[in-house]
Amino acid sequence: MKVPEHYESDVLFFFDGRPDALALYQTLAEGLERVAPEASVKVQKSQISFYDGGLFAMASLPKRKRDPGLMVSFGLGRRESSPRISVAVEPYPGRWTHHVLVTGEDQLDGELLGWLREARDFCRAKGGGRGKP
């Protein structure tokens, strides 16, 4: 993946005080390196964004600081029905944003990485998109 100059320090700052979430993110990033090696990553204030022709996935912390884990969000051209998906919304016709709360490394599995690969492919086919996956 293409990372900015200060990527590692930005990631450490993003996860300051949340070592469990940092470990989950590192596993997620390794998986994304395998399924989307051409992608680029940007660390922002509230999320870490992944781009490949446009924004296709995001990693963020749960809204409540006491909640463990990592929220992984991605966009698909359809609604995925799975008990793993916390929330799915359709911000634009034919574009569904899915949110999966990951609390253990075992949840960063082939199913989730498959959805992320599909999100990357969907984003490429749409020519980017409107900002959010």
Image (spheres, rainbow, N blue to C red):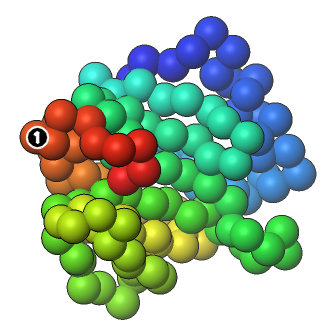
Please give left or right for residue 75 compared with residue 17 in the image. left
Task: Residue type at mark 1: give it.
Answer: Ala
Q: In which quarter of the image is the N terminus?
A: top left
Please provide percent x and percent y for residue 9. 76, 24
Please provide percent x and percent y for residue 7. 64, 22
Please give left or right for residue 12 compared with residue 72 in the image. right
Quickly name the residue at label 1: 125
Please provide percent x and percent y for residue 111. 26, 67
Q: Image point 50% across, 40% down: which residue?
A: 49
Q: Image point 54% across, 73% down: which residue?
A: 101
Q: Image point 79% across, 74% down: which residue?
A: 64
Decide if residue 31 is in sight here: no
Q: Nearer the viewer, residue 78 or 90?
A: 90
Residue 33 lies in what quarter of the image?
A: top left
Relative to residue 103, is residue 73 depicted above or below?
above
Please provide percent x and percent y for residue 40. 41, 25
Relative to residue 88, is residue 36 depicted above or below?
above
